Amino acid sequence: MFGLTLIGLISLNDPPRVNVDKSVLTCKEAGIKVIMVTGDQPPTAAAIAHKVNIISDPKKEYNYMVNELGIDKATAMRDCRAIVIHGDLLAEKHAEEQFVPDEDPDKGKYLLDWISKPEVVFARTTPS
């Protein structure tokens, strides 16, 4: 059809650094909340966060509850233990509130709702 021939496949693996999982557990035991910020896609970020003990139960993550279990968003937000936020959503929410006065008590509520979860990952983020 296109004159192409498959000559092979390659797989890449970029594992977390050694002992990161233990370091995260040590932080949690000390009462320190670890928030992950990465450029990875949300499913990859969630998998890595689980591997290094940032997300303890993937089935209690907001997006999994909504997309895989079919739980409505409000219920999932109330009941989830972890949340993975896409950088595009963060940028969108920030832009929506650009002209909201700093004195408005609802400004930034979305961010407070997200980071109030015990386990938080920001995925597909940019340096800005």
Image (spheres, grey):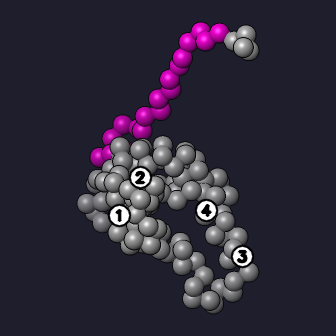
Q: Could you say whether the residue bearing mark 3 is in a helix, strand or loop?
A: loop
Name the residue tied to disc 2: 68
- Residue that appears at 40% across and 63% down: 71
Say which of marks 3 and 2 sits in front. 2
Report if the CB atoms under discs 1 and 3 are less than 8 Å apart. Answer: no
- In this view, the mark in front (4 or 3): 4
Rate crowding at label 1 as few (under 14), some (14 to 19) or many (20 or more) other CA atoms within 10 Å: many
Q: Is residue 20 magenta?
A: yes
Residue at x 41% of width, y 38% of height: 17
Q: Confirm or deny contact between disc 4 and disc 2 (CB under 8 A).
A: no
Helix, strand or loop under label 2? loop
Which-is-in-front pick, marks 1 and 3? Answer: 1
The amino acid beneath tag 4 is Leu
Sooner in the amino-acid sequence: mark 3 or mark 2: 2
Q: Amino acid at mark 1?
A: Arg
Which disc is residue 81 wearing?
A: 1
Our reading of the magenta stretch's main secondary structure is: loop
**Vertical arrangement, residue 12 with respect to residue 80, above or below:** above
* Amino acid found under the numbered disc labelled 2: Glu
- Residue type beneath disc 3: Gln
Q: Which residues are magenta?
A: 5-23
Furthest-front residue in this view: 1
